[in-house]
Image (spheres, helix red, strand yellow):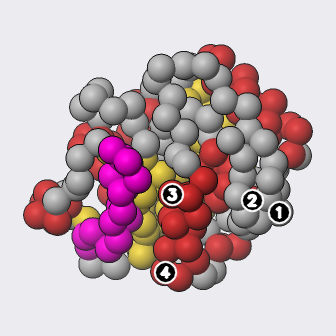
């Protein structure tokens, strides 16, 4: 696994051997960041949240491409150690790492704080919809949510959550989409 673009392009990311981890593939990240650069070309002004960080590849990729700040949330202490080591190795001052339960931490964050939120919760854990409900309030005007899941997020469901599906894709059995806060 490696960072595919930006200042830290080609930097390898150590991936722990864990059944819970499904790192976002390079080509999916390339697609995602192409979408983001088209929709929000002001990357240097953007604040990001990687709520279920895991390897941290989404958050580090966003920081590599110039994001102002990125908050990584991870509950597994082994993964938090790896994230901290990568942050230190890259001298990534714009990255903050918080250890703890993603859903609990999301309730403590200030509304309107983030421009881009990355959601890649463990598949089958039933966390995607509750996480989408919580992060909508965390989005700033024009805020975007990237979500990965085993099934597509239907536009009607997104609408009921106050979000609009703006882009979708699929890689193997993984569905991914970019959503925007309604009224943005």
CB atoms of marks 1 and 2 within 8 Å: yes
| Magenta residue span | 164-182
The answer to whether the residue labelled 4 contacts the one labelled 1, judged by CB atoms less than 8 Å apart, is: no
Q: Which residue is mark 2?
A: 64
Mark found first going from the N terminus, 3 or 2: 3
Q: Nearer the viewer, residue 127 or 5?
A: 5
Residue 24 painted magenta: no
For marks 4 and 1, give the CA distance: 21 Å
Residue that carries the numbered disc 4 in the rendered image: 39
Q: Marks 4 and 3: which is nearer the front?
A: 3
Can you see residue 184?
yes
Label 3 or label 2, whichever lies nearer to me, is: 3
Q: Is residue 76 left or right of residue 67?
A: left
For image coordinates 63% across by 45% down, the residue present is 57
SS assignment at label 4: helix
Query: What is the quadrant of the N terminus in the image?
Result: top right
Does residue 177 show up magenta in the picture? Answer: yes
Q: Secondary structure at mark 2?
A: helix
Relative image position of residue 152 (x, y in whole percent): 23, 53
| Residue 79 location, quadrant | top right
Residue behind mark 3: 28
């Amino acid at each position: 696994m490696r960072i595919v673009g930006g200042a830290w392009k080609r930097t390898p990311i150590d991936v722990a051997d864990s059944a819970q981890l499904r790192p976002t593939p390079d080509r999916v990240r390339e697609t995602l960041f192409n979408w983001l650069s088209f929709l929000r070309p002001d990357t240097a002004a953007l604040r990001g949240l990687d709520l279920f960080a895991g390897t941290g590849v989404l958050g580090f990729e966003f920081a590599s491409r110039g994001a102002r700040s990125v908050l990584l949330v991870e509950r597994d202490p082994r993964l938090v150690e790896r994230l901290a080591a990568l942050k230190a190795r890259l001298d990534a001052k714009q990255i903050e790492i918080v250890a703890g339960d993603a859903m609990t931490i999301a309730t403590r964050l200030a509304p309107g704080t983030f421009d881009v939120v990355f959601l890649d919760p463990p598949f089958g854990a039933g966390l995607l919809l509750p996480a989408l409900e919580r992060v909508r309030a965390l989005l700033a005007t024009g805020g975007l949510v990237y979500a990965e899941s085993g099934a597509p997020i239907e536009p009607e469901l997104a609408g009921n959550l106050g979000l609009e599906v703006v882009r979708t894709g699929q890689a193997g059995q993984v569905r991914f989409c970019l959503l925007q806060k309604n009224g943005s």
